[in-house]
Image (cartoon, helix red, strand yellow):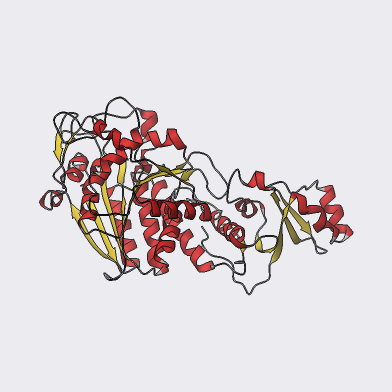
Amino acid sequence: MSTKFADPGISSIPVHVLEKSGLDDWLNGQTSVVQNWVSAAKFTASLGSCLTVPGADGGVSTVLFGWGDAKARARGRFHFAKAAECLPDGTFHIESNLAGTDLTEAAYAWLLAGYRFDRYKGAKPSAVRLKAPRGIDSKRLETMIEGEFLARDLINTPASDMGPEQLEKAFLQLAKQHKAKTRILRGDELLKHNFPMIHAVGRASDQQPRLLDMTWGKNSDPKVTLVGKGVCFDTGGLNLKPGATMGLMKKDMGGAATVMGLAHIIMALGLKVRLRVLVPAVENSVSAGAIRPGDVLTSRKGLTVEINNTDAEGRLVLADALALADEEKPDYLFCMATLTGAARVALGPDVAPYYTDDDHLSHALVRAGRKVGDPLWRMPFHAPYEKMIEPDIADLDNAPSGGFAGSITAALFLRRFVENTTSFAHFDIFGWMPTAAPGRPKGGAFLGGRAILEALCQKLDL
């Protein structure tokens, strides 16, 4: 996969990005040969269409890329990725008709199109390159692509090669790359240091449960903490999932992958924050040691939790990690998790729902998401539903009966473990593209990470 723009010093072929309404005006300034070629090809500049125009030597002299109209473009994003997918080998540059955020998105879309997950099946590397357009921050975009591709690779790797042990290895490699400090607790060390719910969820697996903890930056800078759900495979536990549902559960560590990708971007850009990353890494397996429906667990915070469904395990491991994060009262605390099917039913796979009580942070997230093509939707911490997560025999219920408001009740559950941090946001992401879209093949997806990065930069003036 390519994460870099082409060397600006080499020769390149121009790409003209043309709206339908502007095609005739552009053609009026061209030679009759070009006009006739476009006419013969029936090129109308429809969105995503691509036409190569030959030169006198038979090679490509110019490329026309259809930009459609505003209505067509509003139905998706990263449309320029299609240019990278349809062009022959060579080096290109954007010649005309894009500027500002449109130009930045187009450049990012081109880099997105370079992703290949080739760990198990060889793929021919693309020899189609783009020069960074003038006026964009090319290094920033390349760094963001590296983080996004890291997250995709982690999610796409099956649990046979991405269990808690391998996720820890990737976590330590990331820390070493950026000279970050780490602390890893494994197995019974979790009980010694008071992380009982992480231990309980992961103890049935032959790979020990663990808490991965990374810190980077100066303590004097604003404290940003990222917590990611690292359930490397979720069988459902004793409440075993059906086969059709279990088939995609390698992605249940999508929250961990997302915060690791985002952490790479933050550290590689050298943002002036004190970053902490917490990943409870477990496998929700079935054995004699598995937690049972009806069990009551005591959390790090001291709250007791009745287990009414062992398939609602993500909120349990996150609760212990969030309690730890909250103890130092960071300036910003973000939780990323592939937590509930209810969120997918409500918003589908492409829009990341989030929960926060901080209106200022919420406004920054929405603005940022629109700017960087990372759509978000605020969901409510609806207080009247609190009683739904309060069972008869414990403080909390991990799986309220009734089937209503599943994403909200899960978010309310997590909020019980965050008391000291004012700016807290929980993201209930899908982490997966079920069908391909421009720049985003079927497979692991980096949802919410770009919006959080942009919002932090806005809020902290980074």
Q: Quick check: 288 left or right of 113?
A: left
Q: Quick check: 99 left or right of 199?
A: right
Locate residue 96: give its quadrant: bottom right
For this orientation, the residue located farthest to the left is 192
For this orientation, the residue located farthest to the top is 402
Q: Quick check: 26 left or right of 137?
A: right
* Nearest the eye: 114 or 21: 21
For this orientation, the residue located farthest to the right is 32
Residue 150 in sight from this viewpoint? yes
Q: Residue at x 16, y 48 (%)?
A: 195
Q: Is residue 420 above or below residue 94?
A: above
Number of numbered markers: 0
State the image coordinates of residue 202 (x, y, percent, origin top left). 21, 42
Residue 234 in sight from this viewpoint? no
State the image coordinates of residue 15 (x, y, percent, origin top left). 70, 60
State the image coordinates of residue 416 (x, y, percent, origin top left). 23, 44
Locate residue 286: give its quadrant: top left
Q: Residue at x 24, y 62 (%)?
A: 182
Q: Residue at x 34, y 44 (%)?
A: 159
* Nearest the eye: 241 or 73: 73
* Nearest the eye: 347 or 357: 357
Q: Residue at x 64, y 62 (%)?
A: 99
* Nearest the eye: 395 or 449: 395
Q: Is residue 174 above or below residue 220?
A: above
State the image coordinates of residue 141 (x, y, percent, origin top left). 51, 63
**Which part of the image, by quadrant, shows the C terminus?**
bottom left
Q: Quick check: 19 left or right of 155?
A: right
